[in-house]
Amino acid sequence: MALPLNRHDSKDVADNLLAVLVDLSFARTLEQLTKVARQAVRRLTGADGVTFVVRQDGDCFYVDEEAIAPLWKGRRFPLSECVSGWVMLHREIAVISDIYRDPRVPTEAYRQTFVRSLMMVPVRVDDPVAAIGVYWATHHTATPEEREVVQAIANGAGLAMANVKLVHDLEEAATRERNARLVAERANRLTDQFLATVSHELRTPLNVIHGWLWQLRQPGMTPQLTQHGLGVIERNATHQARLVEDLLDASRAMSGGIGLRCVPLDLNAMCADVAAGERPAAEAKDLTMLIETAGNPLMVSGDADRLRQVLRNLLDNAIKFTPPGGRIVVGVSRAAGSRVRLTVRDTGVGIHPDAIRRVFDRFFQEDGSPTRKAGGLGLGLTLARELVRLHGGTVTVESPGENQGATITVDLPEMMPAVIADSPIVY
């Protein structure tokens, strides 16, 4: 029930206002704040409706309402086209006894409502951030007492809005700090994991080399066993050199220090040559490697060493994750849009859908546990993508799912014949 505002109940009004201001001070959200304000204004003035309007990006946003019939909750109007905007722009109260006789009122917006008279009060008079609208269904001129009460609630609402923003800012700062701490902790874990992986990956070929060097010094070594041991040492030394080179290239990529020496390059011939070099590693795992190249040269402008590195990394990855008895197919073809396409397909362990988007991340291992079967630093695909990007190309990966193989596709710009004619070709 509304309280009649007159001199005889000033103590009741003061007590009610104090209670309202206390409730506003405890509001922690805009929803809580507007509910306290609109209910208090309507109770203390006996009005037929109350709205709480917030100033947002040049608009008046009618956040909440308490009324005998719907008004404009959830709607937005330009500041220049509504009474609440006029109040916030002019920093003063508007008391309008007849809405149809005041030029500040957009009558069409009011015609479908019960409103005949209104009072609009700014929230935070020195720099209004909102307004409280009070409405009557019959002709009514707001009294000085009503103006004072609503302005007092508006002042309290202004302080409460500042408190709500402060609480929101503090919560956001706490969230950012918590997220930063989680990111730092994750980075530390990844660093520790990476260092352990690097240590293991570099130590493994070194242990093999030391073991065979000790074996070669023993009496009774046959020429065949000696040759086998030297081959093992060479392969492991080459593997370790690649690991170190990948680490150096990762550092160069992060600092933008990878440079290219581009020349006309026949991708058919290059793929056949690189695949031949990787075939012994595939055969050692009982894998079949097939080469499907186009009949004619397919030319790109590229750094021969870097593109060979790309294909080696893709093939190493396919060999690593394809079980014995599987198959790897290297294909070169012409693609749409004057592109040359290189694909590496395998029948390996495949990639889980959740891991597809992360396979090119630095140091990513789908199985990062200490007991993982496949070795490596998790840099091969990262470097491949970066080197292809520097050549103006793209790399994509597809996999139907786990244990269903994977296909990595590299698209590079095809070199036009007019350009090729003026340059020596590299194979």
Image (tube, rainbow, N blue to C red):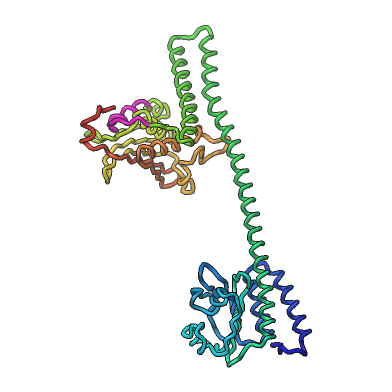
Which residue is situated farthest in the bottom direction here? 138
Which quadrant of the figure has residue 334?
top left
Q: Taking the image as drawn, is residue 76 in sight?
A: no
Left or right of 8 on screen, residue 195? left
Q: Is residue 25 above or below residue 175?
A: below
Which residue is depicted at the point 45% across and 15% down? 230
In the image, residue 340 lies at what x, y percent?
Answer: 29, 39
Q: Nearer the viewer, residue 316 or 172?
A: 172
Q: Is residue 395 above or below residue 140?
A: above
- Which residue: 64% across, 50% down? 177
Name the foreground residue: 375 vs 30: 30
Q: Is residue 294 above or below residue 46?
A: above
Q: Position of residue 29 (x, y in %)?
A: 64, 68
Count of all numbered marks drawn on residues in the image: 0
- Quarter of the view holding residue 414: top left
Q: Tell me which secondary structure the magenta stretch mostly adopts.
A: helix
Over which residues does the magenta segment extend?
260-277
Q: Which residue is drawn at the image coordinates 27% and 46% (left, top)?
A: 337
Q: Nearer the viewer, residue 27 or 197?
A: 27
For the N terminus, the quadrant is bottom right
Queried whether the magenta region covers residue 296, the answer comes back as no
Q: Is residue 265 left or right of residue 71?
A: left
Residue lying farthest top? 219
Give the image location of residue 178, x and y in percent: 64, 51
Q: Position of residue 151 (x, y in %)?
A: 66, 78
- In screen coordinates, is 186 left or right of 365? right
